[in-house]
Amino acid sequence: MKRFFNCMALLLISMMIVAQDIPVGMRMEVIEISQGDDEEFQYSIFQYKEENGNTGYYLSLIHSIELMGIIRGDLARSSLSHYDEVCLPMGATREEAQEKIESISELLNKAPGSTFEFPCRINNGADRLGQESTTTCTVAKRFLRGKLLVFSFESGSRNAQAELSKSALKQLRFGLKLDKKIHPGKKADIDD
């Protein structure tokens, strides 16, 4: 319930801030949610303006690790943590982003162990998107949790993973639909 209220508060804030022009290299969040123990997995859909002026939607998948919690459990509430983030391009318009969410959701109907490759961009550490790369998506089945998608990617010099569950996809889909109702004619969707 707390997550629902946090999500609604973020949507209300975004409703009050109607940004017509996104600065180059800046993220404009559409929806952001988190799941897992201590909000281990975080997801967001955002608009991003490239240096060439093109604006697109991206799905951000973040896996957060509390570094102090690894050393001692009672230190897990500290602010020292590490984030691995991969961003999947979703298209130039909100409609394309909705279609992409639907196609990603359909992957959960595939057999466990099925793998797919997606184009992606890795966060460069300054909330800007780095070079284009690829991520491998594997359909996994977890005991008592059902199917989920596991995205494997290189973050710096190490391999990282981020999980995406069916419930997270539903919340992201709902957030896009709500954004469409709040901002029916976003300038970025009209210009592109």
Image (cartoon, helix red, strand yellow):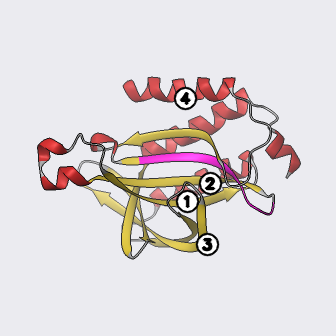
Residue at left offset 67%, top offset 26%: 15
Q: CA distance from mark 4 to mark 3?
A: 29 Å
Residue where numbered disc 1 is placed: 87
Label 2 near label 1: C-beta < 8 Å? yes
Q: Position of residue 1 (x, y in %)?
A: 38, 24
Q: Secondary structure at mark 2?
A: strand
Q: Nearer the viewer, residue 94 or 167?
A: 94
Q: Position of residue 178 (x, y in %)?
A: 64, 31
Q: Is residue 78 left or right of residue 28?
A: left
Residue where numbered disc 3 is placed: 132
The magenta-colored residue range is 42-52
Q: Residues within 10 Å of mark 3 (few under 14, many from 20)?
A: few
Q: Nearer the viewer, residue 65 or 79?
A: 79
- Of pointers 4 and 3, the one earlier in the residue sequence: 4
Q: CA distance from mark 1 to mark 3?
A: 10 Å
Q: CA distance from mark 2 to mark 4?
A: 18 Å
